[in-house]
Amino acid sequence: MNTNATPTPAPVIGAEQLELLEKLCNACAVSGDEGEVRAIITEQLKDAADEMRTDALGNLLVTKRGKGENRVRVMIAAHMDEVGFMIMEDNEGGIFRFDTVGGLDVRQLVGKPVLVGKEHLPGVIGAKPIHFCKREELEQTIPLETLKIDVGPDNAGKVKVGDRATFATRFTRIGPSLRAKALDNRFGVATLIELVKHAPDNVDLLAAFTVQEEVGLRGARVSGFSLDPDLAIAVDSTPANDLPAWDDSENISYNTRLGFGPAIYVMDSSTIADPRLVKFLAATAEANGIPYQFRQPGGGGTDAGAIHRQRAGIPSISVSVPGRYAHSAAGLARIEDWENTLRLLQAALSQLTPAVLQR
């Protein structure tokens, strides 16, 4: 690796990038219905891509070719989908039974405002009021099957079985932080858009905006096979377990922390990151003065879990923006961590050569 090479300048996170992220986060794209986000990406990259196509599963595959010989074919994947809900049954009067899509904590759902369907119809997740609950009910988690989405009688006829619903949280900047739904993984989507727009010439960038990550890495599986890259990087948002311990002692079980830069994965529940890529990304960060952290091993996974097992094996790694309160109505993350993630990936692409994969 040539860490003395001058990387292609990465864009800063300014008003334009924040406006794009806001648009992406406020879009509704629950797993299996990612079209709203796909349309935003298509509009953003229609003039930057050398090739752009949507495959049979709904992945948006974008190619940006480099120049010269011995270019590395590098796949960067960012999933478009978010956790949410699917309408399962019409209970009449604008009240609907629903099921969850992806990993959601049922304890957090009661009273949350939601948006339903293509028209973003406003609704609320309702349950029996606390006034009418028996003591034993208050000591138990509310069963999912007792919760309902209420859109009111005027909108009842506009909701159909199979419609998706998502949290109604709107994107908000809070000083150095961002609060929104679906930061997992609109951070990755916005980052990958910027990388395509500023792709260096020494690589062929194969950008995979994938579907159905939250329900089993399904889009990544087929896009990894289709693109057949030399290596792959999954760009995502990882849960940060960095709150103070319950007794105000030091939290020694954090996996990532806000404000400490992009999280480079070593291992998660679905992937052991390729050690050559771990070394390369860490060295790139240090050579370019970019703060970074290692995501501590533990649960969870990214699109890399499916990509690395395609064909004869694809060397893979994940890089994520840390964020609190993942898979809830509102996540929280730092702008500086997002910007440093973009800086790291841009620098890495600029300095990537076939020598990185030598053993």
Image (cartoon, helix red, strand yellow):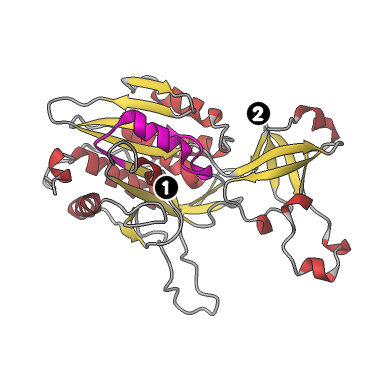
Q: CA distance from mark 1 to mark 2?
A: 27 Å
Please state the horizontal and vertical placement of residue 210, each as a whole percent of the image: 44, 35
Q: Residue at x 44, y 77 (%)?
A: 250
Judge the density around disc 2: few (<14), some (14-19), many (≥20) Cα neighbours within 10 Å.
some
Judge the density around disc 1: few (<14), some (14-19), many (≥20) Cα neighbours within 10 Å.
many
Inspect the image, locate mark 1, and give the three-letter code of the amino acid beneath it: Thr
Q: Residue at x 42, y 26 (%)?
A: 44
Q: Which mark is residue 284?
A: none
Please state the horizontal and vertical placement of residue 163, each as a whole percent of the image: 68, 33
Query: What kind of element bears circle 2?
Result: loop
Q: Would you say 7 lies left or right of 80 here?
A: left
Query: What kind of element bears circle 1?
Result: loop
Q: Is residue 36 visible?
A: yes
Inspect the image, locate mark 2, and give the three-letter code of the amino acid beneath it: Lys
User: Label 1, on which residue?
Assistant: 302
Q: Is residue 175 visible?
A: no
Q: Which residues are magenta?
A: 209-232
- Tell which residue pokes out farthest to the front in this image: 312
Q: Would you say 80 lies left or right of 346 here?
A: right
Splitting the image into 4 quarters, where does residue 225 fall? top left
Please report whichever mark, 1 or 2, sits nearer to the chain's N-terminal start: 2
Q: Nearer the viewer, residue 330 or 237?
A: 237
User: Label 2, on which residue?
Assistant: 118
Q: Residue at x 32, y 29 (%)?
A: 227
Q: Residue at x 56, y 51 (%)?
A: 327
Q: Would you say 109 lies left or right of 233 here?
A: right
Residue 28 drawn in magenta: no
